[in-house]
Amino acid sequence: MIDYNRSALELELESKTAAFIRDQIIPYEKDPRILSHGPSDELRCEMQAKAKVAGLLVPHLPQAYGGYGLNHRQTATVFRASGFSLLGPVAMNLMAPDEGNMYLLDQVGTPEQKAHFLRPLAAGEKRSAFFMTEPDGGAGSDPSLLATTARRDGNHWVISGRKWLITGAEGAGIGIVMAKTESAATLFLVDLPHHGVVTERVLNTIDRTMPGGHAVVRFDDVRVTPDQILGEVEGGFTAAQIRLAPARLTHCMRWWGAANRAHVIATDYAYHRQGFGKALIDHEGVGFMLADNEIDLHQAMLTIDHAAWQLDQHGPLRDDTAVSGRAKVAVSEALFRVADRSVQIMGGAGVTDDTPVQQIFRDTRAFRIYDGPSEVHRWSIAKRIKATYRAVHAGR
Amino acid sequence: MIDYNRSALELELESKTAAFIRDQIIPYEKDPRILSHGPSDELRCEMQAKAKVAGLLVPHLPQAYGGYGLNHRQTATVFRASGFSLLGPVAMNLMAPDEGNMYLLDQVGTPEQKAHFLRPLAAGEKRSAFFMTEPDGGAGSDPSLLATTARRDGNHWVISGRKWLITGAEGAGIGIVMAKTESAATLFLVDLPHHGVVTERVLNTIDRTMPGGHAVVRFDDVRVTPDQILGEVEGGFTAAQIRLAPARLTHCMRWWGAANRAHVIATDYAYHRQGFGKALIDHEGVGFMLADNEIDLHQAMLTIDHAAWQLDQHGPLRDDTAVSGRAKVAVSEALFRVADRSVQIMGGAGVTDDTPVQQIFRDTRAFRIYDGPSEVHRWSIAKRIKATYRAVHAGR
Amino acid sequence: MIDYNRSALELELESKTAAFIRDQIIPYEKDPRILSHGPSDELRCEMQAKAKVAGLLVPHLPQAYGGYGLNHRQTATVFRASGFSLLGPVAMNLMAPDEGNMYLLDQVGTPEQKAHFLRPLAAGEKRSAFFMTEPDGGAGSDPSLLATTARRDGNHWVISGRKWLITGAEGAGIGIVMAKTESAATLFLVDLPHHGVVTERVLNTIDRTMPGGHAVVRFDDVRVTPDQILGEVEGGFTAAQIRLAPARLTHCMRWWGAANRAHVIATDYAYHRQGFGKALIDHEGVGFMLADNEIDLHQAMLTIDHAAWQLDQHGPLRDDTAVSGRAKVAVSEALFRVADRSVQIMGGAGVTDDTPVQQIFRDTRAFRIYDGPSEVHRWSIAKRIKATYRAVHAGR
Amino acid sequence: MIDYNRSALELELESKTAAFIRDQIIPYEKDPRILSHGPSDELRCEMQAKAKVAGLLVPHLPQAYGGYGLNHRQTATVFRASGFSLLGPVAMNLMAPDEGNMYLLDQVGTPEQKAHFLRPLAAGEKRSAFFMTEPDGGAGSDPSLLATTARRDGNHWVISGRKWLITGAEGAGIGIVMAKTESAATLFLVDLPHHGVVTERVLNTIDRTMPGGHAVVRFDDVRVTPDQILGEVEGGFTAAQIRLAPARLTHCMRWWGAANRAHVIATDYAYHRQGFGKALIDHEGVGFMLADNEIDLHQAMLTIDHAAWQLDQHGPLRDDTAVSGRAKVAVSEALFRVADRSVQIMGGAGVTDDTPVQQIFRDTRAFRIYDGPSEVHRWSIAKRIKATYRAVHAGR
């Protein structure tokens, strides 16, 4: 029966997270160790140490890795709370791309791979990167264009190619690389740094929350052995699929928290700031924007919860109803509207970095593109609508 | 724990309703007895007789009145299915304003009032009207302006005033009238027709689904006795409140079904119609509109379900978080967008009455105003945001 | 040098038109002779007689036909004023499709055709129709699908086929028919009624301002002679093109007037109507909507004027920069927003036909589709952007 | 008579500017001397030297200052071309706030003030700042809240107070300061740096094109003499008014060029980048976005030209029809949409700084707030609609 009550565990984790973010992480938001692409490793480790003490490091992972074994739906509650500071997900070691990489390793990795790669990742000892997207017409929203190859050499493979917009590559200790083997894609695990994995440059992007930023990386004949294959040979697309839908949703969850923060700050500003004879919040034009923020946040939350619950029911490979894509479009566009209105409510103050609102606006802009631009998801939803129509009406 | 599974009962009612609408009601959609304000009484009774046979007359009401005793959340499932034809809610006797009036009578009426007023209403023997809104600056979105009075005369009251946009008044057998008594409002029940209750004129409105349309009605010294008081003397606002939140949501439910119908028709059209070298559905511009329709319908469904569930938890008087107002804004605007896109996809065919899409577009336009324009709800949400802020931050 | 001053002639015609509409035409707006598709012929003739007396019948046409010989840009000023009542364009004999047909006859017709067809049309003695659009995948937004044929028989042609959504066909005295001859389209003039031109049915559409409505018409072997060819044999697409761009713009002009009317009525309503303690116009939420109306109307006016001026410079066949399509999208969508906001501002009153606002809302909805849905124009603008890019960058 | 032809002079300046920006300024776009708030003084001077050689330094100013004496409307043509690079307005010495300050000095300054302040400003020897906006509830969108004071001391004045978001203050050689004298505001000219004018901090804002950024500045008893008064004593609001409307429009002009650049880059990208089997530009979803860009740019251009022409006709103090405010809302929101769509079309590449699109997106976001947020202008347009209504209808 339909029921929206949350479990005691997640409610407890939610309030612990909220307090942790408020009391221990927000004070770091002006820390000079926040570099142009997010917190430095030193700052990251310092915050993660506090999260560990608070029992909030990787809260979603199985207990074997220090977490509480949350399902996707419960994870949503905690991740939203973590996003209330843009530093929160890093502090709790549940930011992209590590969080998605941990999930994939847990689902698909061998015991040895889990021990060697997942364990230090979960402990915050290493960061990781997922090398899929390519430059210049290679794999991107359309993965079929994969140009990086792994050619067989005895029972080794040798990876060559270029990757683009690779989040966290700079400074990562672990890499998951997608390359074309015979006729399809295969995923490989590599220890980093590696002499053949060359960061050509780190891109400057509009967002600023992912340590290491987004880099262009070249693979110069990187040799890998069979035990470095993650999942099946030629099974790279399927394995990536396992990662894709959940990773899309966890982006929604974390940035929901950020948009909520923007709304809270804008409300506070509107409550105190006077203009044209009264507090801004008493101007209908401002009040309506706050109301729309609340409506957008509320609907985004319902959409995330529902999509996460469906993922729990069917698993990441049964996303045949395009649930996660639909959620990604709706949520990313709603959160951007919230951030945009919050900037607008704050006027000049909204475009300075005196509050995090300006950065949240920039991050949510990028979010409308990361993990597939809205247009790619709309295209794929439309394709499914057509296929469903044909299936239903073929027999009539 | 959060769970989106529906009960077996509602799923069964949903599929029975879908079949009933498709097989027995849609064939009536071109019936000449559909007048400018909706089906004639003859047609209404004919359809309701079929619904009774199908076990689908007032499915939501308690079993004592022929229903299945559904809660608000379960009601949502069935009402959405009923709305798939604009005639559906009339056929199943769950259209506005009768459905809201039945709910109010069931919640607040005395046993005698239920026997005399609710029973024939539930059976479809009579229609009813709710006389609240007033012309010329009287009670409307702002009920405090109530100008109709009920002056005391011994232990009787005598009602005088004018009411405006009163749905279903023309042809109603039962009226619930809001009038100012001493210092506040009181609700009165009246049998109709009554020589002192004069329909001045029936308005022509853009919608066309509510039998009797919307009328301007004059009360010329209408004398009522104490047993005609519904609820408490001076308790009219509270009693109206009991009706308001649920009635707003059932509007969302029924028109969700209508918007879904528009989407289904537009999909069918886009699948078959060729233009510029391929089926319309294969044009991205059209496919994106269908995708947005689906996203809007999905989010509207989630929003309705959640608001109905909250109503079940807290009751209609604890709508202090403005849940129903928030849902009304979000859902009515989403459904209008769906109807608008469906018209657009169909081009010239979309603006003719060859399909119901054109009328659904018109109805959902009115819906953005009925039961409170979006702006009134945004205003009230903003007020609550401010009050909440003050409450939370007063102590810091 | 850029100059926005209007000529004395058009300013005089504008103010005469404004007074004529206000004093002589608006009083007809509740006339019972306004049928479901617009004014009856009796009412039309009565109003046109008054326009003739006022010197305002076909003001844009050459003096030979009773007008002032306005160019497109000057026409815009007068047509906008005429549209202030939905009856205005009919009263002044400048409504669609007659206005476009007169233009085409004037540009392309032989002296004999002008005497026989254009003269009675300009005098309001006859109405006309333009038979281009077809049902079921025939010519519509994509004219290449033309299915109606005119087969040669000696030096006659025999027209067969079906046409759809033909404005004004019912009751027309003159028809311009597009049919496929050998390999391309040819336009033919026919006197109506004609035994072989059969109105299958008149569609019920959401708009209500075009006398005769929009019909489905069958051509049963309609025999025509060489003197009935309008323009060149096989030159039908070019000739239609001459009509198309100006007709699109005159739609913009007339409906601009209607949207302006809606805005004026909504302003008046907001000024007088009280709600929540003050006049609606003093609520920012309402004031912002009025401001947006004004911005939309202003930009739509600038866009119309500029496109009309370009038409004057280059002629209707040099619309290679898609000027009229761009204007049509921008203006039709802006006017719809104005009408939609005006309805919303007026609340319940906005959805009744107590004022013309509700009908203006419906007409502007149809306008987003008539003469090409926005999507078709966007598609064609995008094609031109690509072609221009290629042309500019091919040589670099 | 309405005429959209541009003068030979402005067309020549437009094409010279286009070539100058393309050939000499765009190559600087990756120059390391572009600091976090825009070009360093060294880079600025280097570019301005080139502009001088090209005859394109302060092209709009009177010939006495090295320009061509353009009116507002002609200025629009040249400024739009200058904005094609975000560096262009700086290179041509027509960026904010200097351009507005020069205009004000030229309109209001004494001969001595022009010689001392305007001449070096026009020559690019100095930069300037306009000290109006204040922190913490002081003068902002609502100038009546002015808190900075200039108290009389003999025939001197002594200025004390704090200013906020003061563009270009850091590094400026000239300041125009608004302070409250007796009962109203007065403008004062000051040479900078000045020991009593203390930059408390430079804000980090989302935009990056105005040298010196936006600072918080304190005035510690800054003593000024009568010859430093700009305009009349107590005439500061009027004088500021002279600057306000034109400055708002020149923002529109310059950022129009930037948005046009974003559109051109996005078109180029869409033309070359493949995805899902064809060039992006051949995807309708992308083509529609480009079409909407073109429509927005076209309407914005018409709106700017018309508002500038009105300014030429009536002067800056007769902006009683809120022309510049209406233009500012329409144009800033249109340009932001163009920038936003351009980012979206480019996907991941759109959020990196590999092209200027990302920065244009950020700048146009700030533009929706600078010189009055859209909401303040809507509020003021609504007030005027009401006043106009009252004036027109009072007598009826």
Image (tube, coloured by chain):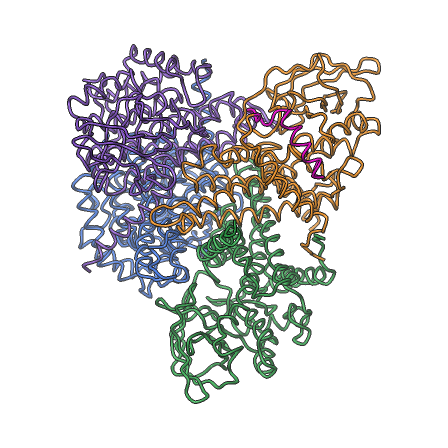
Chain colours: A purple, B blue, C green, D orange
Depth check: C384 or D395 in front?
C384
Q: Position of residue A125 (x, y in %)?
A: 29, 15
The image quadrant of residue C27 is bottom right
Q: Position of residue D121 (x, y in %)?
A: 73, 28
Residue at x-position 61% and y-position 53% = C301
Q: Is residue D45 magenta?
A: yes
Is B311 positioned to the left or the right of D164 in the image?
A: left
Depth check: C32 or B138 in front?
C32
Q: Position of residue D328 (x, y in %)?
A: 61, 39
Depth check: A83 or A111 in front?
A111
Asked whether the viewer can see residue A391, the reply is yes
Q: Is residue A175 magenta?
A: no
Residue C91 versus residue D117 in the image, above or below: below
Q: Position of residue D360 (x, y in %)?
A: 53, 35
The image quadrant of residue D199 is top right
Residue projecting furthest to the bottom: C154
Depth check: C61 or D72 in front?
D72
Asked whether the viewer can see residue C358, the reply is no
Is B347 positioned to the left or the right of D119 in the image?
A: left
Number of callouts = 0
Where does the magenta region start and end?
D33-57
Is B16 positioned to the left or the right of A360 in the image?
A: left
